[in-house]
Image (cartoon, rainbow, N blue to C red):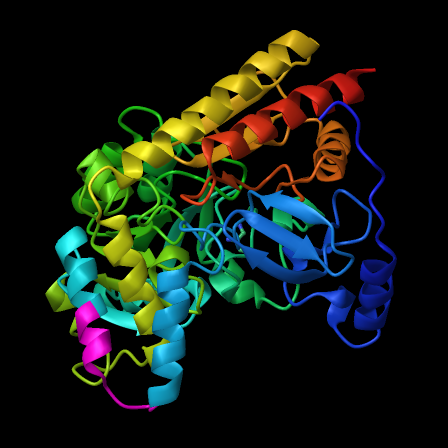
Amino acid sequence: MGTTAKKQHSRSQRAFERGREILVGGVNSPVRAFGAVGGVPLVVDRAQGAQIWDVDGNAYLDFVCSWGALILGHACPEIAAAIADQAKRGTSYGMTTELEIELAEMLQRALPSLERVRFVSSGTEATMSAVRLARAATRRDFIVKFEGGYHGHGDSFLTKAGSGLATLGIAASPGVPQALAELTLDAPYNDLAAVERLFAKHANAIAAVIVEPIAANMGVIPPVEGFLAGLRELTRRHGALLIFDEVITGFRLCFGGAQTLFGIEPDLTTLGKIIGGGLPVAAYGGRRELMEQVAPLGPVYQAGTLSGNPLAMRAGIETLKQLSAPGFYDALDRKAAMLADSMRQALSDAGIEGHVARAASLLTLFFTAGPVEDYAAAKKSDTHLFASFFHEMLQRGILLAPSQFEALFVSAAHSDDDVRRAAAACRESLAAIRS
Ligand code: HOZ
């Protein structure tokens, strides 16, 4: 590991330049554009297990894992077989299948708060639909979200948001009508008193509080003791709904969600990523009397041609089957702890001020001294140092998300050796950016 041969990127460079002539910014999602770290974005050829190859044949150990969707790693044989089998039976029917019922039942067994479930195709759809339902059910218009939280790109979520907006420095997206933007109230994450003040100021007008129960789109920030329980109590007291956005945390921390881990029951939950096994699936669900306000039972309209897509259902079912194996999460946790510990040690050995946040297999190395409890603290990170670190890691064959404000995902496909390799690369990279 001591030396790194300079990687060659000529085909990736050519592909990216060609892509830029037709795809906006050469990408189909801004977070892929290396906007904050510079350099040529990865143009992927294939991936298997924990490895991903670019079109130049460079191999990387992948800690992006499709932004958390691939907890079993790439091209998991059982999932690939299930998709191939389903493809022969038809790829989309636009009608109900037993597969949808089976996956929904599996979700409900793991997350009992999901009394009723609706499948959609992306996390954005899930959060938009959950908020629409919350507004309809409460007959109120305001929502509370948290600075640095990310709930997809629905109009109501694009102020002070994390993920790509944090990465690209977009404070609020143009194109959102002012009248709508004014209905989104932002509070600092982990600041219960701020939420209480919003409830006092907008008495009987807040429909819902939406929160990532473990923030993972401003880097990883776990909730402080009492924060989630406090949100539960405050929302109940004020007649508002509590929405847990578990698009990242669902089935990431345990066989269930953050709600399982913290013992807090939200009114509505959004899921995505892992439940689709790498295919486009998301879901929202929650209390029966709320969900039954959605069409066709109620008037809250939401629909989708590809919702509950059979290929995606097969991938989701196969994924959850594997996640339910005894010891699955313990093994993942052990590897993630190993990586986090070695990163902490490497920071200290390099004499670089930093903070490694971890929640199960979600990690972020912040280039700022801890604690990082909210977006303001996360933003104090030295993003230039992060960019150098990112490229040093990439050069050593380790792919991280190209932003300080994202999580690193350990998957079941990462072996102990992979973790040791990443840890060694981290040590070398930190030493390299210090000098
Ligand atoms: N939640 C993902 C990043 N934090 C979204 C990925 C994307 O925007 O493409």
- Tell me which corner region of the image, top left, top right, bottom left or bottom right, holds residue 196: top left
Q: Nearer the viewer, residue 305 or 142?
A: 305
Residue 276 shown left or right of residue 150 in the figure: left
Residue 112 drawn at (x, y percent): 13, 53
**Callout count:** 0
Nearer to us in this view, 130 or 142: 130
Quadrant of the frame with the C terminus = top right
Q: Position of residue 59 (x, y in %)?
A: 68, 48
Q: Residue at x 42, y 24 (%)?
A: 337
Q: Quadrant of the N terminus?
A: top right
Q: Is 331 drawn above or below residue 172 in the view shown?
A: above
The quadrant where ligand 1 appears is bottom right
Residue 33, horizontal then vertical, whole percent = 72, 56
Q: Going 38% across and 54% down the picture, which residue do you hit?
A: 247
Asked whether residue 222 is in view, the answer is: yes
Taking depth in this image into account, of 163 and 143 the one nearest to the observer is 163
Of residues 13 and 57, which is closer to you in this image?
57
| Residue at the (72%, 34%) spot, across then down | 396
Q: Is residue 334 left or right of residue 176?
A: left
**Does the segment drawn in magenta span residue 101?**
yes
Q: Is residue 334 above or below residue 212?
A: above
Q: Quadrant of residue 87?
A: bottom left
Which residue is drawn at the image coordinates 29% and 63% (left, top)? Answer: 318
Q: Is residue 433 magenta?
A: no
The spot of residue 295 in percent (x, y) is: 23, 82
User: Is 294 situated left or right of 142 in this image?
Assistant: left
Q: Which residues are magenta?
A: 93-102
